[in-house]
Image (cartoon, grey):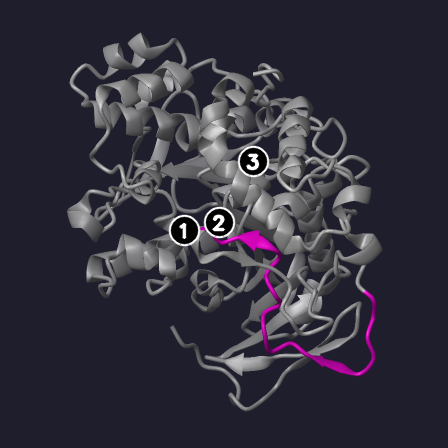
Amino acid sequence: MTIPGPDESVEPVVRTSGGAVRGRTEGGLAVFRGIPFAQPPVGDARFAAPRRPRPWDGVRDAFAFGPPPPQDLGAAGTAGPPDAPGDEDWLTVNVWTPDPDPAAHRPVMVWIYGGAYKLGHSGNPAYDARRIAAEGDLVVVTLNYRVGMEGFAHIEDAPANRGLLDQVAALVWVRENIAAFGGDPDQVTIFGESAGAGSVASLLAMPRAAGLFRRAVAQSVPGTFFSPELAADIGGALAAEVGLRPTVADLSGLAPDQLVKAGQALAPQMPGNVARWGQAAPTITPYAPVVDGEFLPATPWQALASGASRDVDLLVGHNRDENRLFTLMAGKLGKIDEDRASAALRLYAPGGEAAYRTAFPDASANDLYEHVQTDWLFAMPSLHLAEAHLAGGGRARVYELTWPAPAFGGALGACHALDIPLLFGTFQSDLALIQFAGAEPSEEALALSSRFRASWTAFARTGDPGWPAYDTRRRLVRVFDAEPAVVPYPEETSRRLWEGYEFAPLPLLDPGA
């Protein structure tokens, strides 16, 4: 969508706490990219908490996204610092604003990307925020944070949860600077998906983040949070992949891409370590927020039930068929046999395998495998976050996406991350090309996409996305499908199976296994 705006040749200039930045006018929006919110975390700042950015003289061009943090790109390799010297500015923000007028006081939305805490960056075309900013008439900020070993691995003498501390630093930057871009620092909504939603949940529980945002949107909250013991054991295993100890002294001399390769080497070995790492092992993700007792004093569910962030409005939900994307990526879609289903049920189902087989007597092995993993990893953590917020005196809205992705004849269902192209309207991103099979979005998809943005931006503006608050009597949720509806939570069978389950920090089971 293009909104009326100033001359596209105008290059808007805004003064921040670090110095002046020059953006561009694009489609009626002023857009600023690659603004540092912290010093590059290299040299003696590596593995440290983020430090305030160094100020600059003159006007800094904010035309290009900052470089992505070092990360695991899977089969595509690794992403580390570019070859150009001085391009270690991984910790940057980007701003889309209808008008950088300090008198505008528009609501602000701050996006936190996902990626299993090991990949992701704000310059991904999937996170182009122009439609959200234009249609919602608000300011959108996206940010980079450290991932993988740089941001989340346990390293002795380094603070835990460095990636989360980066997010806090970015929110502090928003608090101090967003008014100059036309935003209201007292109307900030954070939103994120997958590991980004886990980050949102963590920020709700972190004392350091208190007061930095008014509302929060958590899309597909993962239930994986590590105990300090598990984090330390996995951190030791990561360092061992490069023949070093998990200390700042040992690891700081190693190039970032070498640390990324350590994670890539360990991940395929993880499923064989169930006896040692339990439910964390099959995720092949050696990173997660650590309930360290300091920066993250409790899990989000514990913290919210105790009243943390009770004054923050929460919008939380999940997709119906989350796990199918991962089954597809593993080449096993539709190929799950009874043995594999039984193993998943034994590992994840509360009450054991029999509970799920009794509750879903007609489900195939494939369906049981998908169902229990969707429930354990995303669906029930998301629902329980809403219920914990209620228990602590807060207010929450809940949704479920049930509209199936068009690819593979609909076999992907409403899979993980389908909400990203629908929310941002970015149907040509790499992930959307899988979910939509490279086809142009249908009118139905475009209408659903518009409803997502309208709901999210209404929530950011008023705290009301357009449906009733969740309660434990009616349990009303918004179902996003071709025909939207407000109904009692559709996954009632799963909800009952998981009732009373505590999403505790994942433990270290047997260090000698």
Question: What residue occupies the far front of the structure in this picture?
Answer: 243
Q: Nearer the viewer, residue 374 or 230?
A: 230
Which residue bears the numbered disc 3?
286
Tag nearer the camera, 2 or 3: 3
Q: Quadrant of residue 393?
A: top right
> Identity of the amino acid at label 3?
Pro
User: How many tags in the picture?
Assistant: 3
Q: Which residue is mark 1?
A: 455
Q: State the extent of the magenta-drawn residues as a range.
A: 54-74
Label 1's element?
helix
The residue lying at 22 percent from left, 63 percent from top is: 439
> Is residue 476 rendered to the left or right of residue 300?
left
**Residue 384 visible at all:** no
Give left or right: position of 33 versus 36. left
Q: Residue at x 46, y 38 (%)?
A: 316
Quadrant that contains the N terminus: bottom left
Marks 2,1: beta carbons within 8 A:
yes
CA gap between label 2 and label 1 equals 6 Å
Which residue lies at the image location 63% right of the left edge and 74% below the top edge?
100
Residue placed most toward the observer, 229 or 265: 265
304, above or below 261, in the image: above
**What distance separates the C-alpha of mark 3 from that of mark 1?**
34 Å
Report crowding for label 1: few under 14, some 14 to 19, many 20 or more residues within 10 A (C-alpha): some
Check the image and report above or below for 316 versus 451. Answer: above
What amino acid is found at the position of numbered circle 2 in the picture? Phe
Residue mark closest to the camera, 3 vs 1:
3
Relative vertical location of residue 331 with respect to residue 358 in this rendering, above or below = below
Question: Which numbered disc covers residue 459?
Answer: 2
Q: Position of residue 294 (x, y in %)?
A: 77, 30
